[in-house]
Structures are given as C-alpha cells and as structure tokens.
Amino acid sequence: MIRVLLADDHAAIRAGLRMLLATAGDIEVIGEAGDGAVAVTNARALRPDVVLMDVRMPGTDGVTATRQIVDEGLAEVLVLTTFDLDEYVFGALRAGAAGFLLKTAEASALVDAVRHVAAGDGVVAPEVTRRIIAELSAPRARPGDRNGVVGPNGVGRGVRGWGNGDGAGAASLPADLTPRERDVLAGLGSGLSNAELAAALTISEATAKTHVSRVLAKLGVTSRVQAAIAARDAGLA
C-alpha cells in the first residue's frame, strides 16, 4: 500500500481528496494536516510515502513544510495547487517537491500522480516542464532588488542552480558523473520518467531508478526537477 498524508487548510478539500484516493486499491490515507507545521509533525510520526501538500496555508506554508519534509527525508512531496505555476509552486519545487498537480485534476490523474511519485518519478506535466525549468534556471532576483520579483520566503522569481536558492551554479557538473549518468541527467532534463529512461537507454527500470538516485546524490539535489535545471544549465537538455 502507498501511504499518503493530506495537508490542506480546508477540511472539505481533505475529505474530497480522501474520497478520491479511496477509489484506488493500493493507496491508503494515513493522516491529515491543516497547516504546514502539523504536516511536518505528522510526517515525522507517520512516515508516509507521499505527502499531498497545499502550498497556500496559514501559519507555516506548504513551501516551508516541503523543505523540512524533504530535508529530513520523511516522504516525497506532491504539491497541489489551484494556481498554474505561481510563485508558491516554484518555491515548493526549489524546496525539493517531486512535482505538482492542479486541484482540478481528474481523479485518475491524481491517483496516477501519487503512484508515480511513490515510485520515484516526477509528475510535472510535459507541456509545462520547459516553462518551469526556464523560470527556475533564470538569473536570481535577490530580495530588495528593484528589478526583480521576490516570491514567498524571499525567493526570487528565478534562481540559477537548485535547492533552497543559494545561487550555486550548475554549469559545471560533478567530475565523477559517469557517461551513463550524464545520459540519465540529459533524460531528466527532457522530463523522462524512469520507465522512459529505461527504454531510451535499453536498461531495466530498476537500473534506471538506481542511476537517477546516484545522479541526484552527486548533484546534491533532492528532486528530478532540480536535476532537470542542472541539465539545462549544463547544456544537456
């Protein structure tokens, strides 16, 4: 069973998500949270496989909660939002979320997204992948910069690099990346899933997953989206 924690400040939305996920025989909702702080606390206690995270919540928002959950290795985070590619979504992706889905998505899309994230894949829709990478790899606007747009938690509208927006450049890839790992990174930059990587490289899906994990570790990032940014900055995608 895939264990899921729901984090949204609206009880009705949590109830709706619980009902939708109940249609899948392999997904179990093990807990709920009405704000980011409770989401982190419950993730520590329950150790879900996936947290469905609303990014706009009072108190501790979903961006901050995502960063804590990912940094502590508690679960994969799938962001749910009403808004298409707003600053909170970018903030959550920088913080290590595995991807995002609109709350208006069909039940089947939500179930599939949870399964993909639990399996280690990202779920950013192909039609917006390039827009996301372009936004996140653009030169960063520092807080207080009159020419930049600063989003939540002081994160600018663009960031060169990955992670928490520390400005680390990605143009110089780690020297210990093997040729196969560079191929995998290029595939991540194109938005390929583990299954698609396996098919493209003529390897098993399990081997593809292992390669992805090694690439993320060598890059020092926590999500496929962050790796895709590195691939773009390095000219691999």
Image (cartoon, grey):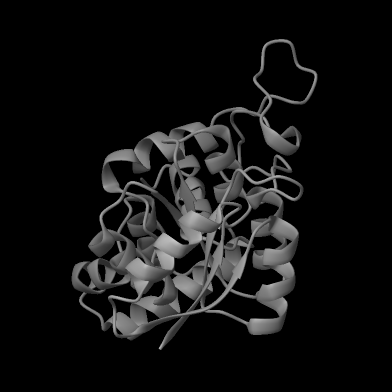
Does 146 appear above or below 128?
above
Q: Residue at x 40, y 67 (%)?
A: 179
Q: Residue furthest right?
A: 144
- Would you place residue 86 above or below residue 19 in this image? above
Instruction: Please state the total of marks drawn on the protein image.
Output: 0
Whether residue 60 is visible, yes or no, is: yes
Look at the image and tell me in which quarter the C terminus lies: top left
Q: Quadrant of the N terminus?
A: bottom left
Please give left or right for residue 196 compared with residue 10 in the image: left
Viewer can see residue 175: no
Q: Residue furthest front?
A: 12
Image location of residue 53, percent across then percent down: 55, 57
Tell me: residue 115, above or below residue 33: below
Percent from the top left, x then y, of residue 25?
29, 85
Q: In which quarter of the image is residue 216?
A: bottom right
Q: Position of residue 44 (x, y in %)?
A: 71, 78
- Of residues 186 and 25, the one nearer the viewer is 25
Residue shown at 67%/65% (left/top)? 39
At horizontal 59% and vertical 60% (from top left) the residue drawn is 174
Q: Residue lying farthest bottom? A: 1
Q: Which of 196 and 155 is in front in this view?
A: 155
Horizontal side of residue 114 vs 169, given as left or right: left
Where is residue 23? Give x, y as percent: 28, 75
Identity of the residue drawn at 41% across and 36% down: 84
Furthest toward the top, the residue is: 146
